[in-house]
Amino acid sequence: MAAMATVVRATVYDRRSPDWTALEAELTRLAWLHDHRDGGQLARLNEHGAASIDPALRQTIAMALEVAAATDGAFDPTVLPLTELWQFDSGGVLPPEPALAAATEQVAWQRVTLTASAAQLSEGTRLDLGAVAKGAVVDRLGDWLEARGIGVYLLEAGGDLLVAGQKPDRSPWRVWVRHPRDSAAPLTVLEVRPGDGRLGVVTSGDYERGLEVDGVRYHHILDPRTGYPAHPMVSVTVLAASAAAADAYATALFVLGPEQARQVARGSAVDAQLVWPADDGVGLQAWRTAGMEAVGGRLNLN
Ligand code: AMP
Ligand code: MG
């Protein structure tokens, strides 16, 4: 299935198969809700500053605001004024410094208000849910499958995974994490067992999207404080109870950098693997929470 400029894959382990056409229709609906471009609910909210919103979109925004608060705005769903300047979706441009400085003033998650069925934005505030949309959409597709009695499945949207239940052969779910500097090799392989529940597994990497200007590479994960790509992280993988939370935290920990990310990861309910360049500039170094160490295979840091 295609949505959100990526491929969405669903694998179910069940005697019955779901109605794939209905599942795809649900995917299309959810992707449209979370898209700030194509005239969907999010686009309308950005345009008018207030709108009633679908429960699924409300749930995503509420979770995004929680992670923004927990990470002191390192993850901030109101980054649209910045991401519009960088235009990473269409190849990217290096924006002029004053424009970036002005846009950082408009990025403030505290200016979003949610009520039971509506959202309101302060003047100039606009949402870009790109950092959580894929995770949020697979979470809701997981709800859709579970409401139809299917509890063992894998959902994937552009590298964002949601795995649920135990496979019939009782083997763990094996997840390849891409090496940030070698797309053909794994950085590591995780073996996860969500038991009766579900687990989100998401990686944010500096290799995903970006542009190069005068030999300098600018990637798509921005530090809302500066308006520029966050340094020095290159790859962050997060395990969380939902794919949306894993997605938001992967972006947040990437922005925070190794020191602060370690503190936030220790104080939160997520497990994380952080990878950044080695001090001598050759190769990479890594840090993992205990829970990540327990499921993570050998790391290839060369
Ligand atoms: P991800 O690939 O999940 O890390 O998400 C990256 C996307 O999220 C970017 O393409 C932007 O649209 C958006 N984004 C970039 N930086 C941030 C940030 N600090 N907080 C929230 N969203 C961001
Ligand atoms: Mg993310």
Image (cartoon, rainbow, N blue to C red):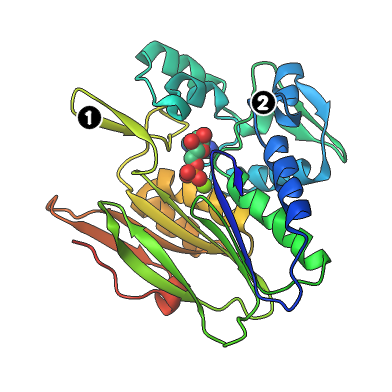
254 lies left or right of 133: left
The image shows residue 167, relative to residue 225, as above or below, that is: below
User: Considering the numbered disc 2 on the image, is that residue within a helix, a strand or a loop?
Assistant: loop
Q: Element type at marker 1?
A: strand
Number of numbered tags placed on the structure image? 2
Which corner quadrant holds the C terminus?
A: bottom left
Which residue is depicted at the point 61% across and 37% down?
Answer: 129
Question: Residue at left 65%, top 50%?
Answer: 136
Q: Is residue 149 above or below residue 277?
A: below
Residue 13 appears at what percent x and percent y? 66, 75
Q: Name which residue lies at 54% across and 21% down.
A: 81
What amino acid type should be assigned to the residue bearing mark 1?
A: Val
- As rendered, which of 204 and 174 lies closer to the eye? 174
Q: Is residue 73 visible to us here?
A: no
Q: Position of residue 65 (x, y in %)?
A: 66, 42
The quadrant in which residue 163 appears is: bottom right
Q: Which mark is residue 38?
A: 2
Q: Looking at the picture, how far across and down is residue 295, in whole percent? A: 44, 77
- Is 150 placed left or right of 92 in the picture? right
Residue type at tag 2 = Asp
Residue highlighted by disc 1: 216
Return the x and y of residue 299 as percentages of the image width and height: 29, 69
Q: Quadrant of residue 88?
A: top left
Residue 220 vs 154, above or below: the answer is above
Residue 113, disc: none
Above or below: residue 247 compared with residue 288: above
Q: Give the quarter of the image for residue 138.
A: bottom right
